[in-house]
Amino acid sequence: MTTATETARRTTRRRFDARKWLPVLGVAGIVLYCLAPFYWMVVTAFRRPADQYDLSPLPRTWSVENFRAVFEPGTGFGRALLNSLIVASTTTVLTLVIGTSTAYALARLAFRGKNLVLSLIIATSMFPGISLIVPLLRLFTDIGWINTYQAMILPSLSFALPLAVWNLTMFFRQMPQELEQAAMVDGCTPGQAFRKIIVPLAAPGMFTTAILTFILAWNEFIIALSMVNEREMQTVTVAISKFTGATQYDQPFGTQMAAGVIVTIPLVIGVLIFQRRIIAGLTSGGLK
Amino acid sequence: MMATITYDGTTRIYPGADHPAVDGLDLHIEDGEFLVLVGPSGCGKSTSLRMLAGLEEVDSGAIHIGEREVTGLSPKDRDIAMVFQNYALYPHMSVADNMGFALRMAKTPKAEIERRVSEAAKLLDLEPYLDRKPRALSGGQRQRVAMGRAIVRQPRAFLMDEPLSNLDAKLRVSTRSQIASLQRRLGVSTVYVTHDQVEAMTMGDRVAVLHEGVLQQCASPRELYERPANAFVAGFIGSPPMNLLDCELDADGARVGGSAIPLPPAVRQEVSSGTVTLGFRPEDVSLVGAEEPGISTTVDLVEELGADVYLHCGLPEARGGVVVRAEPRSAPALGDAVRLGVRPEAVHVFAPTTGERIAA
């Protein structure tokens, strides 16, 4: 009798455990799948150049030789980092300024065809960017924009804006209009109500949008490759693709991996810094 | 700083709507008066309030606060404070900052802001929570912060849009009396919107009943209850509502369930035949013996409320039957045959087409 209940209890406990661990297993699987390439990139970056085709999970001999190679004077990598930073930051700031005002108008103003405008905006983001390269190259050649920052910023801006507008519109829409109305009754102009009440509350949405835009612009490759042929103006993604090995028959995988690690670091730092601000639910509590 | 409020033929037609949301509203609110706008949903009560706040356009007519016409002014220039149904507290500001926000916008000196915020906090028992964010407060506390935000302003008028509807029933009753007594103490003209006629009756100096954008009657709660201007008001005010029956007139009075209810002479002078809408309240009916004049019917439903028992009885003249108040100890049971005696002097008569009250 007692043994029977004991066994029963044990089985239920075991089944309960399995259920509890199943989600953890699922999450672990997804994380592994996403991080495996990054892991390989980091590990390869720390191998000696001679070991670059090794398949061991950890470098047999750790080495920073690849990183040193990245910053050798001939590569122009430092300059490329700066270019990328300028292009990505400008794109992000412009996207935020334009996207926020557009989204606020779409979320709050009543005008005919609002949903059509929103659908069109999201539809433009489905346009394959690659098909724009040739016309853009032609256009930028004609107006003398080859080898300029704006030749990289403007296309990135147009790729980033649709998603930003969509994101922010959804964010503003879920904010009750009573907040602005209360602010206006409290003595604000509509502009002040937006700046003092809505913008602080929209911060999480704006940070999310900013980070997504920055990543998009930072990782952009095709436009940067096509519109720039001067070494001084190229961005990191282009610079990495043009790395050469010690001899011309060498494929500099190790150096490229090291550069990849360096390029990823600012993004990771950015996300970590803003992570706390991205947490949704900052708006909760004002209502009811 | 206080002021009267006047609606002068104020009309609002929403774009694309074929009926005005508020149609020619004429209403005057005295200095320091507590006026309640009440009506079913969609009657235009919130629109009326929002026009006063400047959050809704006025299509024709005017609104005055004191001597000043405010019809075209933006909300910030009207010197009014509003309590919203969902409170609309600023989630990123502490309780103190929420309450002081309007004063900061008005560039009030810091010491003055602090003094007025702490004064209001004391009044509303919010002192321990001044540093908290709204999300760390209970529903009742949030409601009080919304009140505090209005009080701190010392405005010319308070506007309240169903401020109690998010509280649970028990808290609503206690907050109801707190708001009413606070308003009397501060003496600030107040317009209060609710769909709940009990709130309207218990809180207002006067109550304005709206229906389909049209003001039906504006009077003291007692007057509304005893002399409703039309059948709509009669059916809206009171819980349970007044019984309304469509009946034929003959020489003896109004025919209901085989017997006649005599009508006051003043009514008889105006209508002598045809049909009228007859109204009487559940408490103006008594159960009578078989030999007395009365309406014979059976009990369809018994509602036990403790102090009272309400009997629902079927009658061909009344669509939903009639409701009758009975003594709890001697109440008949479900299915019992009863005889209803209506007090003739407590009968209200309305014209069947317009619903307007006839005489008396």
Image: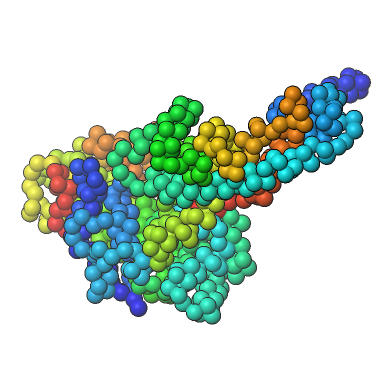
Examine the rendered structure and indicate whether residue B287 appears above or below residue B61: above
Residue at 85% x, 28% y is A50
> Quadrant location of residue A5?
top right
Question: Of residues A19 and B282, which is closer to you in this image?
Answer: A19
Examine the rendered structure and indicate whether residue B151 appears above or below residue A8: below
Examine the rendered structure and indicate whether residue A121 appears above or below residue B185: above
Residue at 82% x, 35% y is A46
Residue A236 location in percent, x, y? 64, 39
> Quadrant location of residue A261?
top right
Question: Of residues B250 and A158, which is closer to you in this image?
Answer: A158
Quarter occupied by the N terminus of chain B? bottom left
Residue B136 in sight from this viewpoint: yes
Question: Of residues A119 and A211, which is closer to you in this image?
Answer: A211
Which residue in the rendered view is the most extreme toward the right? A3
Residue A87 location in percent, x, y? 55, 45
Residue A102 location in percent, x, y? 41, 46
Quarter occupied by the C terminus of chain B? bottom left
Residue at 75% x, 34% y is A255
Q: Is residue B283 left or right of residue B101?
A: left
> Quadrant location of residue A76?
top right
Q: How many labels sit on residues?
A: 0
Residue at 31% x, 37% y is A113
Residue A280 in sight from this viewpoint: no
Residue A193 location in percent, x, y? 43, 60
